[in-house]
């Protein structure tokens, strides 16, 4: 069941999106944006591992994270920042991009997004210039 946004939930200027495997690199980009005076939602800690923690712990963690992240995207003021490295855009990042596009939330990227996928081609993805923020 979908939970409504809590009144005291943080509203961000930008939301960093990307694979959790590149979390450290992506959050460094987010920190640079924070240093320019913006509120930024960073990528959270890695999720539990199914092998070590079990499927129920993984499901609970991922569902909570996805809800929080999607809500942050829906409410952000300036847009999402795709921190794709080496051309990699995973399933969750694509889903976040599609969600942002559907709600007319600007989409920025650190690297060029080269894809033949229609869903990505129709998005007006702009390169983020950190020096001009």
Image (cartoon, rainbow, N blue to C red):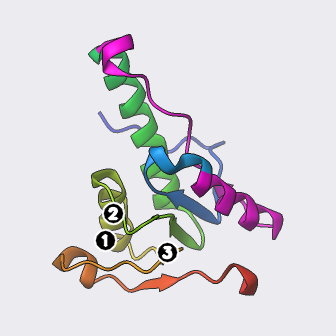
Asked whether the residues under the numbered discs 1 and 2 touch, taking CB atoms below 8 Å apart as contact, a structural biologist would say: yes
Q: Does residue 43 belong to the magenta stretch? A: yes
The one nearer the camera, 49 or 94, is: 49
Real-space Cα separation, disc 3 to disc 2, in angstroms: 15 Å
The one nearer the camera, 69 or 77, is: 69
In the rendered view of the protein, which quadrant contains the N terminus? Answer: top left
Q: Which residue is mark 1?
A: 102
Asked whether the residues under the numbered discs 3 and 2 touch, taking CB atoms below 8 Å apart as contact, a structural biologist would say: no
Q: Which residue is mark 3?
A: 109
Side of 75 relative to 8 (left or right) = left
The one nearer the camera, 2 or 133, is: 133
Horizontal and vertical percent for residue 88?
36, 62
Q: Which residue is mark 2?
A: 99
In the rendered view of the protein, which quadrant contains the C terminus? Answer: bottom right
Element under disc 2: helix
Q: Earlier in the sequence, mark 3 or mark 2?
A: 2
Real-space Cα separation, disc 3 to disc 1, in angstroms: 17 Å
Side of 93 relative to 6 (left or right) = left
């Amino acid at each position: 069941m979908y939970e409504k946004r809590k009144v005291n939930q943080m509203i961000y200027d930008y939301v960093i999106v990307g694979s959790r495997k590149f979390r450290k690199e992506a959050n460094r980009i987010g920190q640079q944006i924070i240093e320019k005076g913006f509120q930024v939602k960073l990528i959270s800690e890695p999720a539990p591992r199914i092998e070590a923690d079990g499927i129920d712990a993984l499901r609970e963690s991922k569902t909570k994270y996805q809800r929080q992240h999607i809500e942050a995207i829906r409410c952000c003021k300036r847009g999402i920042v795709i921190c794709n490295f080496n051309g990699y855009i995973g399933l969750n990042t694509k889903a976040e991009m599609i969600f942002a596009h559907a709600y007319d939330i600007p989409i920025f990227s650190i690297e060029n997004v080269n894809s033949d996928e229609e869903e990505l081609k129709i998005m007006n993805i702009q390169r983020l210039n950190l020096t001009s923020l």
